[in-house]
Amino acid sequence: MIEVKNLVKLYGDKRAVDDVTFTVQKGEVLGFLGQNGAGKSTTMNIITGYLSSTSGTVTIDGHEILEEPIEAKNRIGYLPEHPPLYLDMTVKDYLNFMFDLKKVKLPKKQHIEEICNIVKIADVFNRVIKNLSKGYRQRVGLAQALLGNPDVLILDEPTVGLDPKQMIEIRNLIKSLGERHTVILSSHILSEVQMICDRVIVINKGKLVADGTPDSLSQSMSTDHKLLVRVAGPQEEVKKLLAKIPGMQEVTMVGQRENGEVFDFSLEAEKGMDIRREVFKRLAERSWPLLGMRSSELSLEDIFLQLTAEDSASSDSGNGGNA
Amino acid sequence: MFAVLKRELSAYFSSPIGYIYLAVFYVFSGYFFFGVLYSNTTSLSNVFNGMFTIIMLLIPILTMRLMSEDLKNKTDQALLTAPISLLSLVLGKFLSALIVYCLGVAITLVYAIVIATFAQPDWTVVFGNVLGMLLLGAALIAIGMFISALTENQVIAAVGGFAVGFSLILVNSLSSLITVSWMQKFVSGLSFMERYDEFTNGILDISNVFFFISICAVFVFFTVRVFEKRRWS
């Protein structure tokens, strides 16, 4: 359905998008994961024809976006990061305008009503967009993208700035839309992508660093077996004791606190092993107080660091890569 | 194109801009028309002459928001990703401003009818005048729209429009200072006022008509290019 080939976008010397290639099958929901400034929006703007790529091609259902822009754009509904709303119009006028602009051939009144019901904005239909809350504006933006039932929906950070309740609503909505449309969705929230998408692409600094299902991605990132502990006791002996725990692979001293009597250790056990109880038991036997313990959960930041480090490995294997 | 045209027209009249433009246009043309009535003549040329400077000042008000507003609110993303060509988008905007402008110009026909109740005005001259005013406005709107496409700041777009308007007025006095004859010819050839004056004097020179239409075409084309270029940069 969507084919992106060797996409490059230069802003001066900066490579905003650097040789990105991927395809999206019909009916697939693809998540686009990346930090701010990673090149997500730029890629989406190129796919929708708002920007032109420096090199590379984008094909929507067999129509190249630059060669047959009208054919290709006909198949796309786009919700940019900042919803393109005319604030001085009412929701009704705005949707009517977008309906005409997109030259939709469906029965107008009925179609707009239908979409308003899907995204639940029927109650603000006659209000001026300026006076709507962020959540409603986002939904009007989404309604605009849905006009004409396009095959492809491109949604750029659709849940940014919403409150948690709205976020859940919009996510559920997108999930249900995924049953009838091919969706590309960008986000910097890992759990959101995990919940909605069939497939995830991670980009960093314009480069594609991972491509796989959410499960494979999170498995490769799983960190249950890594712990950080803080112990009051003699450094060397504690280290030796911890190293004797079955399945323990590595114990490293990472910090010293409170006049050199308290130490932080980073522990790494075999994958899938839960060593937390064992650590507590052994320290208790020797009466070395355990002052703190936390699993070194990876933030998105860490995942990116990890992914960029494995950059070459993961692009060879074509998926998240089991680290 | 018609979707854009319709929206832009309604935008003029859902904000004060359309009304302010019309009010100012009517007030000043009314003042000049009063002069015509007072001096016991059927020639409306004074009205058209006097409106030249007013139009130069008013058109940037009409055109300043045409493109800048979309750039600022990022609504250009909706327009440029819609399945329409850039040209029809630009033309839709251009025509919307032109229609609002025409609503202003239409008042001169009312003046002509008022005159006609006293004595027959020279209708061919009146229509020549109206045509000149329309062409002048269309050319200035195209230029103003082009300037508006260059910036997302409406104030800058308006000031840029004023600057162009004043330079076009200055061109006249400038050309009289130039002694090199070909250069003088070139500079005075750029003068909007000289060409417009021919209309108000009742001369319909086809080259003047072409001049204004070409200015429109060139700046509509430039505006399309600005969008093209922004996409590639």
Image: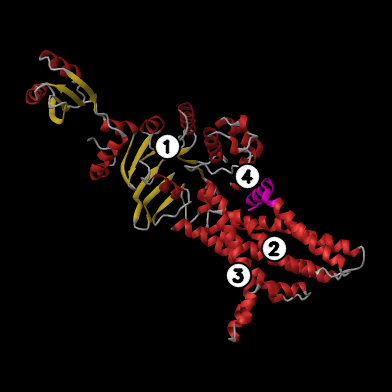
Q: Nearer the viewer, residue B163 or A113?
A: B163
Residue at position x 63%, y 51% from top?
B4
Mark identifier at residue B167: 3
Question: What residue type is disc 2 on?
Answer: Ile
State the separation of the CA atoms marked 4 and 2.
31 Å
Span shown in magenta = B1-18
Judged left or right of residue A135, residue B137 is right
Judged left or right of residue A300, residue A139 is right
- Residue B145 position, x and y percent, is 60, 59
Q: Are marks 3 and 4 in contact (CB under 8 Å)?
A: no
Mark identifier at residue A28: 1
- Residue A100 position, x and y percent, is 63, 46
Q: Label 3 neighbourhood size at 10 Å, few (<14), some (14-19), many (20+)?
A: few
| B98 is higher (above) or lower (below) than A103 | below
Disc on the earlier residue, 3 or 2: 2
Element carrying mark 1: loop
> Do the residues indicated by labels 3 and 1 lie within the same chain of the protein?
no
Q: Nearer the viewer, mark 3 or mark 4?
A: 3
The chain under label 2 reads B
The chain under label 4 reads A
State the separation of the CA atoms marked 3 and 4.
38 Å
Q: Label 2 neighbourhood size at 10 Å, few (<14), some (14-19), many (20+)?
A: many
Decide whether residue A313 is among the magenta residues.
no
Question: What residue type is disc 4 on?
Answer: Phe
Residue where numbered disc 2 is placed:
B55
| A68 is higher (above) or lower (below) than A270 | below
Element carrying mark 3: helix
Element carrying mark 4: helix
The chain under label 3 reads B
Residue where numbered disc 4 is placed:
A97
- Residue A39 position, x and y percent, is 38, 47
